[in-house]
């Protein structure tokens, strides 16, 4: 499968625990995005990377959230001290930006449930 | 900031009929308008997009229209089929995917 892959697909955690998700973008894509999607809503932008540089962070991304893309390939999203309100689908997408608009391809998402 | 409103939230049509989903946006600087289809438990997938220098775009049974003056764009699906059942999202951007602002989605139900 040469698409965007995310791991794990599902995560159940107790409130207060830390969780980390991984995203592997399409190999030649230089942009990587994280979105959060709650039931019945469209995805909400969290952050994005151009290669290894994190260029934008949404106000939705509190201090408990951190994302990295150390070598410009895969990315991780960590949530510390999880809260029930963090329960959502976390989507990763990637695109190849060459100066023009290009399609972002989405992964299957990681569904987080905080109990 | 940009706000995208999408209507209706649920749309039920008879198989073979047409379906129309409408979106409005607030930021007149927005210039890219994609539509995504998301089946239950699956990833969003781009089905069609339109840029602000074009008023209409068609791809087989799917078409999108854009009215920049009214800040309004619509998705039209003709000859609907059962596999068209899904949630459809519109979005707007000022030129880069990271600024993609999404509508709340429309659940399209195709009745046999």
Image (tube, helix red, strand yellow):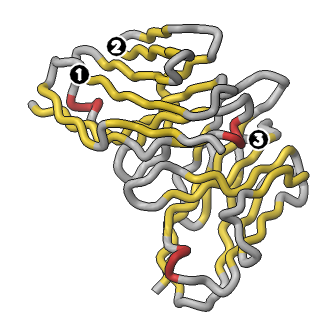
- The answer to whether one can see residue A2 in this image is no
The residue pinned by badge 3 equals: A27
Q: Residue at x 52, y 52 (%)?
A: A108
The residue pinned by badge 2 equals: B61
For the residues bearing labels 2 and 1, Cβ distance under 8 angstroms = yes
How far apart marks 3 and 1 lie (CA) works out to 35 Å
The residue pinned by badge 1 equals: B80
Marks 3 and 2 belong to one chain: no
Q: Does residue B61 appear left or right of residue A42 in this picture?
A: left
- The answer to whether one can see residue B68 in this image is yes
Residue ranking furthest to the left? B112
In the depicted structure, whether residue B106 falls above or below residue A103: below
Q: Residue at x 65, y 28 (%)?
A: B30
Residue B101 position in % (x across, y down): 59, 42
Which mark is in front, 3 or 1? 1
Label total for image: 3
How far apart marks 2 and 1 lie (CA) works out to 8 Å
Which mark is in front, 3 or 2? 2
- Chain on which label 2 sits: B
């Amino acid at each position: 499968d040469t698409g965007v892959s995310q791991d794990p697909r599902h995560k159940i955690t107790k409130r207060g625990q830390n969780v980390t998700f991984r995203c592997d973008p399409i190999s030649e894509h230089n942009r990587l995005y994280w979105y959060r999607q709650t039931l019945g809503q469209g995805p909400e932008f969290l952050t994005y990377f151009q290669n290894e540089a994190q260029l934008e962070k949404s106000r939705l991304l509190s201090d408990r959230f951190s994302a990295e893309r150390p070598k410009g390939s895969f990315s991780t999203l960590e949530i510390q001290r999880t809260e029930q309100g963090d329960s959502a689908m976390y989507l990763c997408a990637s695109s190849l930006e060459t100066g023009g608009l290009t399609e972002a391809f989405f992964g299957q998402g990681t569904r987080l449930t905080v109990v | 900031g940009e706000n995208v409103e999408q209507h209706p939230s649920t749309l039920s049509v008879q198989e073979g009929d047409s379906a129309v989903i409408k979106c409005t946006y607030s930021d007149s600087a927005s210039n890219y308008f994609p539509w995504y289809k998301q089946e239950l438990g699956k990833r969003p997938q781009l089905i069609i997009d339109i840029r602000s220098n074009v008023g209409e775009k068609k791809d087989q049974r799917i078409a999108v229209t854009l009215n920049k003056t009214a800040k309004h764009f619509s998705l039209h699906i003709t000859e609907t089929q059962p596999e068209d059942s899904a949630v459809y999202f519109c979005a707007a951007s000022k030129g880069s995917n990271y600024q993609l602002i999404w509508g709340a989605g429309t659940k399209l139900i195709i009745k046999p």
